[in-house]
Image (cartoon, helix red, strand yellow):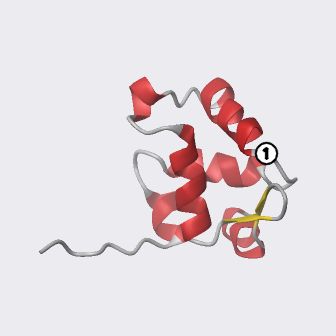
Amino acid sequence: MSEMVIKTLDDLLRDPEYGNIYREILKFCREPKTKDEIERFVLENLQATYEKTKVWPAYFIWELEKTGGLRWEGKWKTTEMGLKIIS
């Protein structure tokens, strides 16, 4: 039987491998962004390619949404909680 692991936004930002990527995405999404804009930012600005991270850029969006850091409002936007935690 596998155990379900529940992560919080704080857990994501403390992650030794991906924490900085999550933090930078939250900063980037202070102004609403499309999925394509975020993926391009992750690949080009953060240099977080699949070869380096072993996950696709959409994974970071999904994790931030699940933990309450990003929300969909026609585009992806950092939540109030996300803004507080990165300030």
Label 1: element kind: loop
Residue 40: which quarter of the image? top right
Q: Residues within 10 Å of mark 1 (few under 14, many from 20)?
A: some
Horizontal side of 79 relative to 1 (left or right) equals right
Q: Residue 15 at x, y = what percent?
A: 42, 55
Horizontal side of 22 relative to 85 (left or right) equals left
Is the N terminus in the top left, top right, bottom left or bottom right quadrant?
A: bottom left
| Residue for point 63% across, 72% down | 68
Quick one: which residue is furthest to the left in this view? Answer: 1
Q: Looking at the image, is 49 positioned above or below residue 30?
A: above
Q: How many marks?
A: 1
Q: Looking at the image, is 45 positioned above or below residue 20?
A: above
| Residue for point 21% across, 75% down | 3
Residue 65: which quarter of the image? bottom right
Quick one: which residue is furthest to the front in this view? Answer: 74
Amino acid residing under circle 1: Thr
Is the C terminus in the top left, top right, bottom left or bottom right quadrant?
A: bottom right
Q: Looking at the image, is 6 positioned above or below residue 24?
A: below
Quick one: which residue is furthest to the right in this view? Answer: 31
| Residue for point 70% across, 55% down | 26
Q: Residue 86 at x, y = what percent?
A: 69, 62
Q: Residue 66 at x, y = what percent?
A: 55, 68
| Residue for point 60% across, 53% down | 61
Q: Nearer the viewer, residue 33 or 74?
A: 74
Horizontal side of 21 relative to 6 (left or right) equals right
Look at mark 1 in the image and give the residue it sits on: 34
Q: Residue 48 at x, y = what percent?
A: 53, 31
